[in-house]
Image: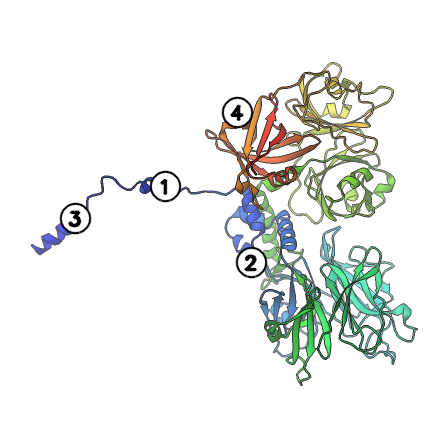
Amino acid sequence: MVKNAKTKRRNHKHPRPSNPPAIEDKKPTIVKTLPASLILEILCRTPVKSLVRFKCVSKSWLALLNHPTFIHMHLRFNTISRDTRLICNCNHFIALLSFSQPPIPVLNINRNFTTRPNYPRRINFPDFSKNMVLAGSINGVVCLTHYKEMLGRYVALWNPAINQWNPIELGRSRSWQNVSVGFGFDAVTCDYKIICIVPDYYTVPVSAVSFDMFIGWSSVEIYSANLGSWVNVPRRRTIPFSPYAYSQHCNFIVRGVPYWAGIDAGESATPRPLEVLGRIDPCTGSYMKVLYPQHIKNMSTRVLPVNLRGSVAALIHSPGEHPNQMVDLHVLDESTAKWTKLYTIGPLIFENLQIPQCFSTGELVLESWRGGINRVSDLLSCFCDPKTNLVLPNKEIEVLHPFWGDSYSHVESLVCVKGMVQIGKEQNDKKTKSKTRNCSELRELSSDFVFLQVRAMEFAGVIVEKWVKVLTNADLDSDEMRLPPKFVKKYVNRLKTNSLLKFRNGYEIATVFNHETGTFSGLSTMYEDFLFEVGQMLVFEFDGSCDFNVYVIDTDLTEVEYPPVLHHTQSGHPRVVSVKRGGLKFVYFVKEESPLYDELEPPASFKRSFRFFPGYQNYIFSNGKKIDGVYNNESGKFKGLSKFCSILGLENFSQFNLVLFTYEEHGMSSVAFFDDHFVEVLFPGTPLSIGQNSENPTATGRIEIVVKPYHMYQYSYGVDVSTVHNSITAFWKKTDYINLHSGERSWKVQVKCRGVKNRRSTINNGWIQLREDLGLVEGDIVVLECAHFCGNHFALHVVKNDGA
C-alpha cells in the first residue's frame, strides 16, 4: 500500500491555472545580431588585451582585427580619447604609470642571473629582457636596447600588448661602443625606424664642466622596419653633435622624432661647451640642433628637456643670478624655433631637486634625494600640476622606484611591425611565415565586415568640392604637391596633418599635409608605383573627414586602367576595378571657340570601353538635379545638357574650364564642372529647386524623421526609417549611399536595408555629422523629398520644434 501511495503521489499532476498571468504570454525581445558598424565602434573602444582574445571568436573577427584599417582606427581612437600613460623601467619589472590611476605591471624581470660569455647563441626575449633598456615608444611599439652582454650587439622592437617582438642585430662592420639608441616614425612611408648615434671619439671634458660627456662628431645609423635592414644616410652620416656620456637612449620623442640632450661639436672651442638638443628626422635622416631658451644662470641652474603634450619643452630649475627653488617652463614653437614661457612653478621646498619626466596630461614628476645611503630607495617622488602649483606625493609610484629617465609616453595598440614574431616562437620561422600568409588570406573571408572594403572609395559626411591636378615634370621630380589655394583657404580647418590618398585599386599612401604651405609631402613612391606621366590628371575627392579618394585620368582624357599594385606598407591583394563599381570617368575641356551647350562628345578611348550606350540617359549634377538626355549612337555624342543651362539661366557653359563626366551602367551619369583653378563648382539648390525657363519637378516621395532623445546621443549608431516609406526605400540597395541637399550644403549618408517582406531601413553612417551641421534638437522633424525615380538624391529641410 505504501508503494502504491508513493506511485500515485509521484504521478500526481497539479492542475494548471485556467487563466495564466498575462505576463507569461509576452516573449522577451532578443536582438540576434548587432549592425556591423556598431560592432566596429565597440571594438574600437575595447582594450587590446581583450581584442587579442577576440581573435578566437571566428575567422571573420580574426580577419577584421588583423586588418590594417581597423588597427589604424583603433590606434587613432585610443590616442585621441584616452590619456597616454608612461611605460617605465621599474628595476624589477616594466610598468605603465599614470597621474590618476595606480601602476599597471606589464612584465616581470629577473635580473639575478650570471653573465655568460659569447651569449647569446640563440636570441630569446626572456634573456634579453633581464638587462634591457627602454629607448622609446611610438604607437604602442617599444624600442629596446641592452646594457650588458648584448650591448652593441642587439636592439629590438617590442609590442607588449600583443606579446610580439623583433630582435635586430647590429652590423659587425663597425664599432657600436657608447652607442645611443633612438626611435622614430616616418609618417610619410609609415615606417618605424631605429636611429643610432655613435660618437667617433672620447675627449676629456673641459674643466668648467662638472660631468663627463663626449665632445666631438658622431655618426648616424638608421634601421628601417619596412626594409628590414640598415639604411645608409649619405651626406648626413656624420653630425657635429654628441649625446651626453652614458646616455644609452634618446631623452624623449615628439610626434615620431627622437631628441637627445648633448653637446654641439661646432662650439667645442668655447670656454664652456654649448649644451643643445639634437634631433634626427626619421624621414630624411637629417640632423638639426635646438638651442635652449635664453636664461640667467647660477651654479645651481639646470635645464631639463621633456615632452609636454606633444611639444618640446624645457624646464629650467633655479633660474636667475642666485640659487633658488623656482622652475620656469618653456615650450618650443618648431615652426619659428622660438621659446615661449608658460609657467613659473615654486618655490618648491626640496633638496637635490630633479624634474625627470612629464605626463601626457601635463603633470610634472618631482624627484628628491633624502640624503640616505641607498640612492634608489631614499628617493622621494611627487607630482606637480604647473597650472595650480599643487604638489602631491605618490607613495604607489615611490615604492616602485622607477627610472624616470628610462620612460616614454605609451599607448596600447595592435600594431605589428614587419618582422615581429610571437615571444617564445623566435626559432619557428617557417611556421610563422605560413601563419602570416594565412592571415592575409583570411582578410578576404571577412564577409561580415565587408563594409571596410566597400567604404574604401565611398564616404559619409559633408560633400565638398573636388579638384584636379595636372601632373608636370616638376611634380614627378618632387616629393610634394601643392593643393589649390582656394580649396585650402576654405577647408583649412577640416584638413588634417596626416591623411591617406586612396585609389580605386586599393592602393593607399599616407601623406603629411603642411598647413602653412598648403602642400602634401611623401608622394614620390606613389609616382614610382603608378609610373605616372606628364599630362596625366589626378582628381581628388575629399571625404569630409581626413582622407582623399583619388582618380587617375590618362593623357587621352579617359580614366586609366589601374595597375594591380599596392603600397609596400600594405598587405593583401589589390581590388578589381570595374565599371559596375564606380563607373568610368572622362574629362572634357571647354573651348572658347566652341563652348559647350547641349552636345558633348566623349574621347575615343572612352567609347572603346563600352560595346553599347543606351539611348536614354540621365544626368545628375552637384545639387542633385536630374535631367533627361540621350546618347546618339550615330554621332557618338551625349545630348540634353542645355536643360541644365536653362535651369541656371546660362547661355552655355563657357564660364567653366572643364567637365568631369562619370558614366555608370543603366544610363546614369554624374556631371561636374570645374573653374579656372581646377576646383569644382558646387551649384546651389536641391533636386526640387525651381529653375529658370525649365519644368519644375514635383516631390513624389517624402520621408519624415522625428528626432528622438536617443538620436541625440554622443554615439548614435543609426536612425530607423519608418516602413511607411518603403515605396521610396525599395530603390535602395542593401548597403547604399544617398545625397541630401539643402541650399548650398550637401551631405552623403550611408543607409542599410534588411529583410525582404518586412523591409527595414536605417541611416547608418553620417547622421552625427548631419545632426551637428543642422543644429537638430529633440522634437525636430527632418523632411526628405525626392523627385520621380530619383530615390538617391533628396531635398532636405527641417521643421523646428517650437516647444524645444
Q: Nearer the viewer, mark 2 or mark 1?
A: 1
Mark 3 residue type: Asn
Identify the mark at residue 49; answer none if there is no mark: 2
Q: Considering the numbered disc 4 on the image, is that residue within a helix, a strand or a loop? A: helix
Vertical comparison of 341 with 528: above or below: below
Q: Does the residue at mark 2 contact the one at mark 4 (Cβ under 8 Å)?
A: no
Looking at the picture, how far across and down is residue 254, in whole percent? 74, 60
Of mark 2 and mark 4, the one earlier in the sequence is: 2
Residue 228 placement (x, y as % from top left): 72, 57
**Which tag is nearer the camera, tag 1 or tag 3?**
1
The quadrant the N terminus occupies is: bottom left
Q: Amino acid at mark 4?
A: Ser
Residue at the spot x=77%, y=18% of the render?
599
The tag on residue 727 is: 4
Mark 1 vs 3, N-terminal side: 3
Q: Nearer the viewer, residue 58 or 731?
A: 731
Where is 244 relative to 649, above or below?
below
Residue 596: % across, % down: 80, 20
Query: Real-space Cα distance between discs 1 and 4?
Result: 31 Å
Name the residue tied to disc 1: 27
Identify the amino acid type marked 1.
Answer: Lys
